[in-house]
Image (cartoon, rainbow, N blue to C red):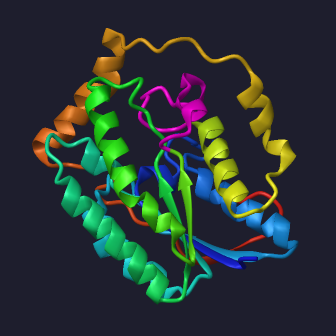
Amino acid sequence: MFHSYAAIGDSFTEGVGDELPDGSVRGWADFVALGLAQHAREPIGYANLAIRGRKLGPIIDEQLDAAIALQPELLSFNGGGNDMLRPRMDEQATATRFRDAIHRIREAGIHVLMLSGANPTEHLPMGRVFDSRGARLTAALVDLGTLEGVTFVDNFNDRGLRDIRYWSPDKLHLNALGHARVASNVLTALEVPVPPEWGVEEVAAAPPGPRSRNTAAYYREFVLPWIGRRLTGRSSGDGRVAKRATLEVVDSGPTR
């Protein structure tokens, strides 16, 4: 049983797509913290240092040491999704940096929760290119899941999670249902019961959503601004700080 949990990563781990009425974001990591607290039947400590838009290098350089310094019992690590969306990606270097980060967490005596991100490529322009990169990166790292002290959750190859019902209007970030499903995958891998009130099984059993179509409005609202940020060297995470930089108490009630 884990009594403290820290998360590092990009928008996937920050919780983008699962927006709350006050404008903050929740996401799968918040759900996991709640599930751990409910299972422990006592409060746990939870920190989330993830920041949207971060590539793998900045995640490691800016977040990893800070998370290890918190000395959590469990530390989740995901990254590389933003690297895959760039015109060029050094797949070998990315896999090597990811591998080194996992070993650093293990050497600190912390249990590693290693995740692949959910796969949005069936709905994105140039999706086949990104799908191939993600598949190769996941395959290059899957052996780490056999190491002692590592739990690997392969969301990238969760076929059901690709359904449009789980994705936000931008088709790049999960919505609240998608984040709940990822949290369910994580808790199941950790052998922690998934709270039935999340409704994950009911949603999964429903008929698939309609096939996604990328309209002109979609390109105007989401694709062109994304291209604009790339051309000007900006990121959606510029100026942002971690939403939970320290281990804050989570009990069996709501996370916010």
Magenta residues span: 156-174
In the rendered image, the quadrant that contains the N terminus is: bottom right
For the question of whether residue 192 can be seen, the reply is yes
The number of callouts visible is 0
Relative horizontal placement of residue 102, taking residue 76 as reference (left or right):
left
* Side (left or right) of 232 relative to 223: left
- The residue under the point 42% across, 29% down is 170
Work out whether 222 lies above or below 200.
above
Residue 50 visible in the displayed image: no
Residue 68 lies in the magenta stretch: no
Q: Nearer the viewer, residue 228 or 180?
A: 180
Give the x, y percent position of residue 200. 75, 38
Frontmost residue, 203 versus 222: 203
Q: Look at the picture and state if 234 lies above or below 44.
A: above
> x%, y% of residue 67?
47, 79
Residue at point 39% right, 60% down? 141
Give the prevailing secondary structure in the magenta stretch.
Answer: loop
Residue 161 drawn in magenta? yes
Q: Quadrant of the C terminus?
A: bottom right
Q: Position of residue 24 (x, y in %)?
A: 55, 51
